[in-house]
Image (tube, helix red, strand yellow):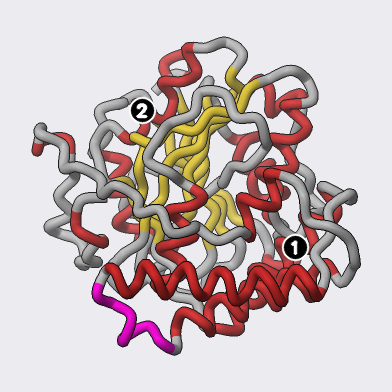
């Protein structure tokens, strides 16, 4: 495929993702948008990840584990890319519909849009509280022009020419996507959320891994937004309010009994990790912080409706099955 023919380049960061990367690559090949190149940036996989990836028409770029940072691996993949749009996908996600890429890049019709990110949902064994996180962070309604830089590079796209002007920060411990969005918004560009560009995000984290994830993201958020703080009072009020909110929704869903331990444990690791990452005192005010840490509330989200066109949905019949919640996200 000639460079001029490539519409978008899908950049996948991975390390030891043998359980998931085959499903993602299969889903990309099912897309209605055909002029696509796939780049896999691997940071030292010791399992069968690279063997699986090599069965697909992908370009593999390897970096040493000690060279890894979230921003550096993205910059390396972006430098190898040729498409007009750079699409980022976590190695443990997979698209639900054949028009995922088509819908993800559609908002770029507005020349002021610099970044688009799409909806994420979990699988049947996703922790209940993380389902609530997904529902809050990725609502059912699209937003063509956000007033804050929230986004997520597990399912996002940017313009390559803007990345060439503003590369990712390679020193951050996480949230390099939000940092980029904040800097690009300062240049007068827009961030769009596309609810119809849906992926399934598989997180099988231990409690310690949840703690570490939120801790490093809080460290990064403190660097990106030095005016932000998360103190012990924030922990003491947000932890129980989120547990209560999750418990309310779990009870309405008939899942409270099976999540009596999981809900408070996940929220404890989330907020204690955030507190340990910030270790500062001060008020919690911004919309960005609200998006990260505030509870979903008691309003029930409307379930996603199954598309009337069954051909839109990808059938992963030859891949290991991971049942999605409601099988309709």
- Against 10, residue 24 (above or below) is below
Q: How far apart are marks 2 and 1 (CA)?
A: 31 Å
Q: Is mark 1 on a helix, strand or loop?
A: helix
Label placed on residue 218:
1
Q: In this view, does 220 lie to the left or right of 191?
A: right
Q: In this view, does 283 lie to the left or right of 246?
A: right
Give coordinates of residue 165: x percent, y percent: 76, 24
Q: Nearer the viewer, residue 74 or 215?
A: 215
Q: Is residue 328 left or right of residue 266?
A: left
- Foreground tag (2 vs 1): 1
Residue 56 part of the magenta segment? no
Mark 1, residues whose alpha carbon is within 10 Å: few (<14), some, or many (≥20)? many
Residue 54 in sight here: no
Which residue is at a point 32% across and 41% down the rendered structure image?
28
- Against 207, residue 70 (above or below) is above
Which residue is at a point 51% across and 50% down the rendered structure image?
137
Q: Which of 97 and 3 is in front in this view?
A: 97
Q: Which of 243 and 102 is in front in this view?
A: 243
Q: Is mark 2 on a helix, strand or loop?
A: helix
Give coordinates of residue 278: x percent, y percent: 83, 67
Which residue is at a point 20% across and 59% down the rendered structure image?
326
Mark 2, residues whose alpha carbon is within 10 Å: few (<14), some, or many (≥20)? many
- Against 156, residue 280 (above or below) is below
Which residue is at a point 69% across and 35% down the rendered structure image?
181
Give coordinates of residue 92: x percent, y percent: 42, 60
Question: Magenta stretch?
Answer: 254-260
The residue to which callout 2 is attached is 103
Q: Which of marks 2 and 1 is nearer the N terminus?
A: 2
Kindly indicate the quadrant of the structure image that contains residue 276: bottom right
Kindly indicate the quadrant of the structure image that contains residue 311: top left
């Amino acid at each position: 495929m000639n460079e001029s023919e490539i519409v978008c380049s899908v950049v996948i960061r991975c390390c030891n993702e043998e359980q998931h990367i085959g499903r993602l690559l299969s889903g990309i090949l099912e897309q209605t948008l055909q002029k696509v190149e796939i780049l896999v940036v691997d940071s030292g996989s010791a399992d069968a990840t690279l063997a699986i990836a090599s069965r697909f028409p992908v370009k593999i770029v390897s970096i040493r584990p000690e060279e890894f940072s979230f921003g550096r691996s993205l910059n390396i993949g972006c430098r190898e890319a040729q498409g007009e749009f750079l699409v980022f996908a976590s190695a443990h996600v997979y698209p639900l519909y054949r028009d995922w890429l088509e819908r993800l890049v559609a908002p770029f019709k507005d020349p002021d849009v610099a970044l688009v990110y799409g909806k994420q949902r979990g699988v049947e064994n996703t922790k209940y509280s993380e389902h609530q996180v997904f529902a809050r962070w990725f609502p059912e309604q699209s937003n063509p022009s956000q007033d804050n830089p929230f986004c997520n590079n597990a399912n996002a796209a940017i313009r390559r020419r803007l990345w060439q002007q503003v590369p990712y920060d390679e020193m951050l411990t996480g949230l390099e996507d939000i940092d980029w969005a904040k800097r690009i918004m300062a240049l007068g560009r827009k961030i769009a959320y596309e609810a119809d560009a849906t992926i399934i995000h598989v997180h099988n984290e231990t409690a310690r891994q949840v703690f570490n994830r939120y801790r490093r993201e809080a460290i990064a958020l403190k660097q990106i937004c030095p005016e932000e703080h998360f103190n012990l009072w924030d922990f003491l009020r947000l932890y129980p309010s989120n547990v209560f909110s999750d418990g309310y929704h779990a009870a309405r869903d008939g899942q409270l009994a099976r999540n009596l331990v999981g809900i408070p444990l996940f929220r404890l690791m989330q907020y204690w990790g955030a507190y340990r990452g910030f270790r500062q005192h001060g008020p919690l005010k911004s919309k960005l912080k609200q998006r990260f840490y505030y509870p979903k509330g008691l309003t029930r989200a409307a379930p996603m409706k199954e598309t009337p066109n069954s051909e839109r949905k990808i059938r992963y019949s030859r891949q290991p099955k991971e049942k999605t919640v409601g099988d309709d996200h």
